[in-house]
Image (cartoon, grey):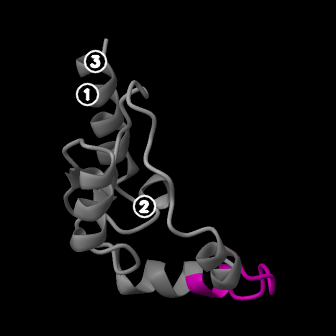
């Protein structure tokens, strides 16, 4: 995404909400998270290579917790579905779904 596009979208989002999206105190109160049940369905742990919010270490830790391999989508940022290359994320999801049939 070009710098001009980033600036345009930042301006549009600037006044969108003053409500925090994540309450860290509430999150910390819910930790540690219990292990998933033994026969829980498989989960997709997917992240983005250019993510500055959830890094690769966090992605790997989450995948390890669920005993799956992480899927890293190259060349996109944190909100994959909002990225200019969102199709990469949708292809990764479709591939995972086809493998879990």
- State how far apart marks 1 and 3 are (Cα): 5 Å
Q: Residues within 10 Å of mark 3 (few under 14, many from 20)?
A: few
Residue 49: quarter of image: bottom left
Q: Quadrant of residue 51?
A: bottom left
How many C-alpha atoms fall within 10 Å of the one at disc 2: few (<14), some, or many (≥20)? some
Q: Nearer the viewer, mark 2 or mark 1?
A: 1
| Residue 13 placement, left or right of 35 | right
- Tell me how far mark 2 sits from mark 1, CA to CA: 19 Å
Residue 99 in the image: state x and y as whole percent.
Answer: 23, 20
Q: Is residue 5 magenta?
A: no
Residue 66, disc:
none
User: Nearer the observer, disc 3 or disc 2?
Assistant: 3
Q: Main secondary structure of the magenta part?
A: loop
**Magenta region:** 10-21
The question of residue 15 being in magenta is answered with yes
The residue positioned 22% from the left and 61% from the top of the image is 60
- Residue occupied by mark 3: 98
Q: Residue at x 73, y 82 (%)?
A: 20
Q: Nearer the viewer, residue 82 or 2?
A: 82
Q: Nearer the viewer, residue 29 or 24?
A: 29
The residue indicated by pointer 1 is 95
- Residue 7 vs 74, above or below: the answer is below
User: Residue 83, labelled with which disc?
Assistant: 2
């Amino acid at each position: 995404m070009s710098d001009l596009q980033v600036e345009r979208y930042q301006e549009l989002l600037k006044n969108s909400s003053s409500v925090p999206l994540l309450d860290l105190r509430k999150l910390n109160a819910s930790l540690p998270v219990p292990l998933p049940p033994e026969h829980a369905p498989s989960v997709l742990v997917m992240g983005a290579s250019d993510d500055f919010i959830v890094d690769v270490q966090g992605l790997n830790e989450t995948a390890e917790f669920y005993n799956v391999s992480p899927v890293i989508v190259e060349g996109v940022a944190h909100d994959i579905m909002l990225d200019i290359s969102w199709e990469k994320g949708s292809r990764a999801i479709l591939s995972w779904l086809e493998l879990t049939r």
